[in-house]
Structure formats: structure tokens, C-alpha cells
Image (cartoon, coloured by chain):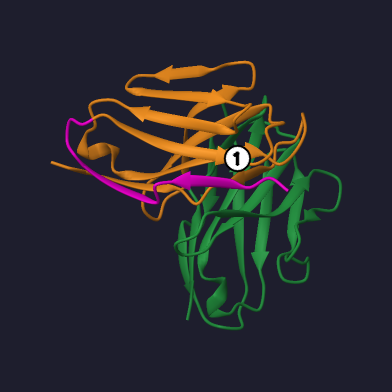
Chain colours: A orange, B green
Amino acid sequence: KQEVTQIPAALSVPEGENLVLNCSFTDSAIYNLQWFRQDPGKGLTSLLLIQSSQREQTSGRLNASLDKSSGRSTLYIAASQPGDSATYLCAVPYSGAGSYQLTFGKGTKLSVIP
Amino acid sequence: SAVISQKPSRDICQRGTSLTIQCQVDSQVTMMFWYRQQPGQSLTLIATANQGSEATYESGFVIDKFPISRPNLTFSTLTVSNMSPEDSSIYLCSVGDSYEQYFGPGTRLTVT
């Protein structure tokens, strides 16, 4: 059974800092990994999707990396802003190719202090 | 990508009543998923809804408590039946597209 762990559970940084969020998974036989953002009481916004054949994906100030062999992914946020304050979730498919069901980590709650 | 809407966005319900949540997608999709997010927790899959067949429920979730309909390729409903305060959660529907998931805005349910 796939298990996803995110560290740290919460993070508070001053505006302008670069930061890294960590995600680890127990079953390395994944075909992608997805990072989401969730604002309080709201739904999920997809940030980045990394296919198993990729090592990195970038979108603006966000960069996600994937190391399947070690079961780890990181989300790097450059020059953080107060608007980045949210909970960040990583998720991997349940099992095997073609499965759309996701297993989620518990998330990292990020607070960016002006 | 897919654009997903949910109704209602939030509701406060009495114990013992039922609530039906609607999920509408702007394109035809094969599979739709319903997730629950209890306060302070991450998302847990309730069931997978395929058009034309019975929904497939995950361990710990049963059809009598969470009946699902999937009448066509763009719409699904989830009913939370005989509610108790423990059902207070955010309920989200999602769809998969080329192995990427898209989520609706969620329905925030509070049971008193």
C-alpha cells in the first residue's frame, strides 16, 4: 500500500525567502507525482505534474523535482510571497499505470510573513 | 484541463438528515472520483464513479451511507445519508485527464 509523507507539517518564513517542501513515498513504482495547493476551506489547485521519466518541472517561481529510486520529491518556491501562504499537498497514483486514484500526503502548511 | 463546479459550496445540516452534492464537469470524462477531507486531515478517496456502472467504494465507505449517481459523462452526485457530526468535512469531486487530476472547489459540510 502506497504511503505518502510530507515534511515539515508546517513552515513559517519571512517574505522573500526561498524554501523547500519535501514529499516521500513508499512505493517507487509510480508513473507521476502531482503537487497541489489548497487554500483554507477550499478545493485543490494543481501546481505541477512530474512524469516518472522526468526529474524536474518548473512553473514560474515553483520547481518540483522527482527521484523515483529514493522515493522523494521536493517543491522549491523561490522568493516567497504572502500570497504563497497555503497548504501544499503532494499525491501519487494508487498503483500501476492507468490508475487515476491518488494517495495524498497530509500536507505542509506554509505561512509567509510580510 | 477540466473545469469542475460543485453545488452547494457549503451547507450546515442537522443530524440525521441527508445532503446531495452535485459535481459538473465542462467536458466528458470516463471516471469521476469523490474524496473526503476531514478537519485537519488530508484527502481520502470515498469512491470511483464510472458512467453506466455501479460506483466502486473504498474500504470504510459503503453505498448505503454514500450513494453515488453517474447519469452521464459530465455529471455526478454524492449523497451523505443519515448525517452525524463526524461527517463534517470538505467533500471534493475530481476527474483524471492524461493521468493528471483536476479537482472541484469542494463542498464544506457542517453537521450539527
Q: In this view, does A57 lie above or below B99?
A: above
Task: Verify whether residue A58 appears in magenta.
Answer: no
Q: Which of A59 and B91 is in front in this view?
A: A59
The number of discs equals 1
* Amino acid at dot 1: Phe
Q: In this view, does B49 lie above or below B37?
A: above
**Residue B79: percent from left, percent from top:** 66, 64
Q: Quadrant of residue B67?
A: bottom right
Residue displayed at 85% across by 45% down: B52
**Residue A10: percent from left, percent from top:** 34, 51
Mark 1 residue element: strand
Q: Nearer the viewer, residue B2 or A98?
A: A98
B33 vs A22, left or right, is right
Residue displayed at 61% across by 83% down: B16
Q: In which quarter of the image is residue A16?
A: top left
Q: Nearer the viewer, residue B61 or B52?
A: B61
**Residue A82: percent from left, percent from top:** 21, 39
B28 vs B19, left or right, is right
Badge 1 is on which residue?
A25
Farthest-out residue, right: B53
Span colored in magenta: A1-17
The disc numbered 1 marks a residue on which chain?
A
**Residue B109: percent from left, percent from top:** 50, 66
Residue displayed at 80% across by 43% down: B51
Residue displayed at 73% across by 66% down: B60
Which quarter of the rendering shows the N terminus of chain B? top right
Farthest-out residue, left: A114
Task: Verify whether residue A8 appears in magenta.
Answer: yes
